Image (cartoon, grey):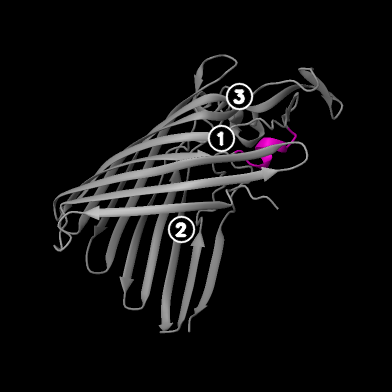
Amino acid sequence: VVRRIPERQSTVEQSVASQPEQPFQLCVYACKLRQTYFDFSFDNATLRNKALNGALGFTYNPSDKWRVYMNASTGFRSPNVDDIGKVFDSEPGNVVVPNPDLKPEQAYSVEVGVGGTVATNFYFDVSAFYTTIDNAIARGPSTFNGQDSIDYDGQLSRVLSLQNISKLHVYGLQMGINWQLNKYLKLTSSLNWQSGKEKDPETNRNYAPTHVAPLFGATHFIVRKGKLQVDCYANYNGEISYKNLALSERADSHLYLADADGNPHAPSWWTLNLKASYQVVPHLGLDAGIENIADKRYRPYSSGIVSPGRNFIATLRFKW
């Protein structure tokens, strides 16, 4: 069985730090290389792709409470079984046919950030990133046996296929805090914002890419005392309006609610949750929790499945 991910890879990592004999390091360097080989062959198509990818990181510590860092990396995604060999109807009137000539997508990313302790027991981190993807795979007009439309399940359907016809640009910000309020109570919070552009090959206009997530984050209030830990937290996602909805997602309008103009959009949502754990004895622990306490109905962006409502969890852990 051929998997969706590469079967064989080799990785080389190296880190170098100045003044290694000191408890505080002024500069830290990181370097990483990975060789990936994906071998997929069958009667009608052969797919063998290679890519040498790497990552380079640098961290500067002006003091023992602050750090400034930068990372650069490359990425590679070989077309999977669905991309190269699946026939499916994405929407009425369209049918997507296989394309055995797909090439790998290549990603190039850079990230810069700063983190530090600004007050007693208060740590924050903020970073910005930018990613560009060459040979991005997107749906485009195609033909089957020389025809641009075929009869599929009794309906005349336009022929599409996945092709290397797009270029993506994705950028965003990430922020996080960790605040030890007192001996027992801690507050952590994170927030991630992304945006981007993808050029539609048919109209030559820029639209939001398919896999740019909406604004999302989580906030945790954690209490630890003795053998007991209680975590009260909220998960939240922002809205994606019709204007910022990817073209492929607009086509899957049945997955989304309609806005005031009747266009599909992904509304914002949040959930409140509570979990607790208690270490009864050194080898025995008990976990319990309630997810989605308010019993809200919501659907994660681009998912075809509505998330569960109020959910109760109980776990008994035994270690030896």
Q: Residues within 10 Å of mark 1 (few under 14, many from 20)?
A: many
Q: Amino acid at mark 1?
A: Pro
Q: Is residue 82 magenta?
A: yes
Dot 3: element = loop
Q: CA distance from mark 3 to mark 1?
A: 37 Å
Q: Position of residue 269 (x, y in %)?
A: 48, 43
In the image, residue 293 above or below residue 105: below
- Viewer-closest of 74 and 217: 74
Q: Residues within 10 Å of mark 3 (few under 14, many from 20)?
A: few
Residue annotated with mark 2: 273
Residue at 62% from the left image edge and 40% from the top image edge:
48
Q: Position of residue 210 (x, y in %)?
A: 54, 32
Residue annotated with mark 3: 262
Q: Tell me, for residue 258, which label it has, or none.
A: none
Residue annotated with mark 1: 104
170 lies left or right of 262: left
Q: Which residues are magenta?
A: 79-88
Q: Position of residue 178 (x, y in %)?
A: 27, 55
264 lies left or right of 286: right
Residue at 15% from the left image edge and 59% from the top image edge:
24
